[in-house]
Image (spheres, grey):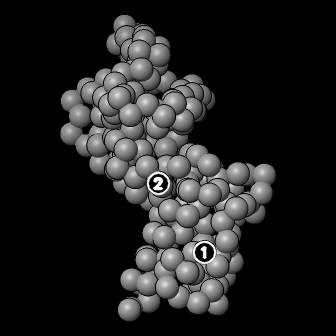
Amino acid sequence: MPRADRERQMMTIAEAVFAERGYAATSMDEIADRVGVSKPMIYEYFGSKEGLLVACIRQVRTELREQTAQSVIGARSPEEALRSGLQAFFRFTDDHRRSWELLLRTETAVVGPAAVAEIETARQEQIQLHIALFSAYMPDTDQRSLEAAAEILVGACERLSVWYVRHDDVTPEQAAEHIMRMTWFGLRGELAHQDDHPQ
């Protein structure tokens, strides 16, 4: 098997094991056994258990960034863009539930700094996407207010996703509406303020 394909196979299986057991309880022996390779081969590819976890998280955050960024292309209004982005976020948790469990269940107290940094990078990428989106529709809003709004939105999404994955009867659209109801009023007020007081 080509190295790139073998690496993806290792990451796919490792992602499932990490999500099932949590980082601390996962053994490299089990991952190697499920992949059908020797444990030294996994170390050769990823260096350590944390290195393997970091590679898995990096793949998750890349997919999440790409899907949420694509979802707002062509939006005709800020409300439509925000709703589309939120629906894409919750759809991601549906389509990649193991990946999302991996991010949610990674215990920052037991993993190393590289994994913690990778998780925070995933959050920051979503924050920067929201800041860019808000800036496009609210160009006169000061940067600090945009940053605060993005932090609030990402934090709300992350916490609601914990609730969301426990409720199979809730759709991505319904989850997105919960966030919209809690956040859109404030953002809409800021847009109206700019329309009433053009620079």
Locate residue 182 relative to residue 68 in the image: left or right.
right
Q: Residue at position x 40%, y 57% from top?
A: 63
Image quadrant containing the C terminus: top left
Question: Which residue matches tag 1?
Answer: 30
The residue at the point 39 percent across, 83 percent down is 5
Amino acid type, mark 2: Arg
Please indicate, yes or no, whether residue 79 appears anywhere in the rendered image: yes
> To which residue does mark 2 refer?
98
Locate the N terminus and report the quarter of the image it occupies.
Answer: bottom left
Residue 96 x, y percent position in the rendering: 40, 52
Between 162 and 187, the one nearer to me in the picture: 162
* Residue occupying image coordinates x 34% and y 41%: 91
Q: Is 184 placed above or below 167 here? A: above
Residue 38 lies, in percent from the top left, at: 58, 90
Q: What residue type is labelled 1?
A: Glu
User: What secondary structure is marked by label 1?
Assistant: helix
At x 49% / y 49%, what residue is drawn? Answer: 100
Q: Specify the label residue 182 is tagged with.
A: none
Q: What element carries label 2?
A: helix
Res 174 → quadrant: top left
User: Which is nearer the eye, 181 or 48?
Assistant: 48
The quadrant where residue 78 appears:
top left
Looking at the image, tell me whether mark 2 or mark 1 is earlier in sequence order.
Answer: 1
Q: In this view, does 39 lie above or below 160?
A: below
Give coordinates of residue 158: x percent, y percent: 54, 36
